[in-house]
Amino acid sequence: MIESIRKYIAQCPYLDEFIELNVNYLVDKAKAYSINESSSYNPVLNEDKCGNKSMQFLFSFDAKLYWNEEIKNNIDNSLFCENFRNWLEKNDNNGIYPETEENIIPESIGAVTNGYIYATNADEAIYRISCKFTYLKKGGMFKE
């Protein structure tokens, strides 16, 4: 699932096209992005008698950006996070989801938090946005 999410997020028009979108790794320089699967959650929301499962995939989007005392810079960082969140919401409203396997039917995608500063150093901050993708995984078998 993480590869599908990565390909999907890489299409966001607010990401710098010259910066690679990593998975579970954020390079040690400003202007970097990463998709990270969240930990400690149950991916299965519920299951029916036919083996169909309502599922969730929780992940965070991290952006390492320049951070300093300049108000405009920090407002721009917040605007980037807001634009990313709005892009997810617009796609969800229009039924635009990650490409998935044949037995997976996307239901929703979106941010569950605003972008917030997760970590900082002298001149960089990691902004994190927690996200959720929900889908139906078809089982195709009857269960008693």
Image (cartoon, grey):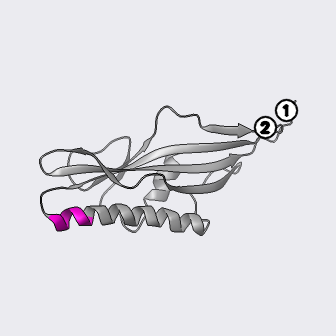
**Residue at the image position 54 percent from the left and 66 percent from the top:** 91
Quarter of the picture containing the N terminus is top right
Quadrant for residue 76, please give it. Answer: bottom left
Residue 127 visible? The answer is yes
Q: Position of residue 100 (x, y in %)?
A: 61, 52
Quarter of the picture containing the C terminus is top right
Q: Which amino acid does label 1 sit on?
A: Lys
Residue 11 visible? The answer is no
Asked which secondary structure carries label 2, the reply is loop
Is 73 situated left or right of 108 in this image?
left
Label 2 crowding class (10 Å Cα cut-off): few <14, some 14-19, many 20+?
Answer: some
- Return the residue nearer the eye: 12 or 110: 110
Q: In this view, does 79 lie above or below 136?
A: below
**Residue at the image position 78 percent from the left and 37 percent from the top:** 51
Quadrant for residue 137, please give it. Answer: top right
Q: Name the residue under label 1.
A: 143
Residue 75 magenta-highlighted: yes
**Residue at the image position 49 percent from the left and 31 percent from the top:** 40
Is 21 situated left or right of 100 in this image?
left
The segment highlighted magenta reads 71-76
Q: Between marks 1 and 2, how big is the CA–CA gap?
A: 6 Å
Q: Earlier in the sequence, mark 1 or mark 2?
A: 2
Q: Where is residue 23 in the image (x, y as percent from the top left)?
A: 40, 44
Q: Mark 2 points at which residue?
A: 51
